Amino acid sequence: MPEKRDSGKMATSTTQQEAFLENGNIKLLSREMRHGSRTAHNMSSSSLRKKSDRALVSKIRVGFLRMFFTNLQEVLLGTKLAVLFLAIPVAIVAQFCNFGSPWVFGLSLIGLTPLAERVSFLTEQIAFFTGPTVGGLLNATCGNATELIIAIFALTQHKIAVVKYSLLGSVLSNLLLVLGTSLFCGGIANMSKEQNFDRKQADVNSLLLLLGLLCHVLPLMFKYAGKSPELTAVGTLQLSRASCIVMLIGYIAYLVFQLWTHRQFFEAQEDEEDDDVVADDESPVIGFWSAFVWLVLMTAVVALLSEYVVGTIEAASDTWGLSVSFISGILLPIVGNAAEHAGAVIFAFKNKLDITLGVALGSATQIEIFVIPLCVIVSWIIGIDMDLDFNLLETSALAMSILITAFTGRNISLHKGTGSSAMLRHYRCMLFRV
């Protein structure tokens, strides 16, 4: 048994040395600098990773092949969701062989689940060499890559309703389903304890969500202020675009606040005795260029599956008897970020609410003040009229969710009753969408 453990350590050391050699003159950062790039999103995704046994790969004598199979093992098999990768080639085959649009849609959704977790893993590997600032920017850009790519493909096909419902559903699922489930499960698992958290991060995210809500309410109020929606359509569109510019400026200020001036508020607190988090803090498991190439490949596969999802969503709606709004607003957000959401619940079980809140509120904030306004600006560039008017019912649901989350975040301790009420509100939203 000791010999096997020593063999594994030697294999790990060999792999790490190869990772360093691969990077040429790229300098590996100190542990303190790397620790600064560990955000709640990285910590949440790392809960679903598993340690790879490199003993067999280390026996390959050819250095290039050994490095290739090591990268393949770490990227494709280094997650507990690895079995879901099988859905990707099956979805591609189903698309080209015309197996049926509902099958393509379902398989593409399943294939997107492990890809989202792997993108987070690869951005973290790159951050080992680029530092917390560039790593944080990468995480901010790729953190919600799935929603952004699906939204852009839907825009190019003039499916504005799909874009609005999917992005609104992502915000609601993070604020109600993910946060509510985490607090409820964490409250049951820690029945005799209070779930405490740092309120500073929650306050920042809540204020940004309120800013986004204001930018949604203004076009809606302007539309109803006129005698008819047709008379105020141009003004509503112009007001929406101006509001999106304000939100993007606020998002840039948020990044400066998060990555430079007050970075300590957003660093994930790691437990040294936590054996479930398998991410290695001492050194990367793959090299910089390998991580970069894999990130490009993963993003390309996400784009391909997103195109399948957008192209087959109406056929799936007709076959399954579910409305497009339900599929866009409920299924897409839940399945697309299932790995991240599961990680948030796992850390709530461990009474680590700072990480849970960082995932739920952080994702909602990023979608609300970055992805949504960016989609409006992109639609403006390509000549499509998309505004921030999400209709009265949808905007009311968004407002209630943000206000309830903001008031919940005012407490420095939470319990399972808070989570159960948030879950029930999300289920009500699901019933409205069926």
Image (spheres, rainbow, N blue to C red):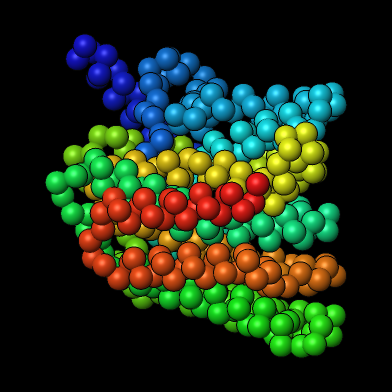
Q: Position of residue 411 (x, y in %)?
A: 26, 67
Q: Is residue 82 above or below residue 121?
A: above
Relative height, residue 379 to residue 329 (above, below)? below
In the rendered image, residue 420, in percent from the top left (x then y), is placed at 36, 50
Residue 225 placement, left or right of 196:
right
* Residue found farthest to the left: 192
Give whichever of 240, 256 is nearer the camera: 240
Residue drawn at (29%, 17%) of the image: 7
Location of the N terminus (image quadrant): top left
The answer, for residue 56, to whether it is visible in the render is yes
**Splitting the image into 4 quarters, where does residue 257 fall?**
bottom left
Location of residue 118 in the rendering, given as x and y in whole percent from the top left corner: 52, 40
68 or 418, which is in the foreground?
418
Residue 430's spot in the image, x, y percent?
A: 57, 49
Give whichever of 304, 73 is nearer the camera: 304
Kindly indicate the quadrant of the structure image that contains residue 5. Answer: top left
Name the residue located 66 percent from the left edge and 57 percent from the top edge. 165
Query: Can see residue 233?
Result: no
Residue under the image location 73 percent in, 48 percent down: 324
Q: How many marks?
A: 0
Between 327 and 69, the residue placed more toward the observer is 327
Decide: is 313 above or below 395: above
For the point 84% across and 23% down, the residue is 97
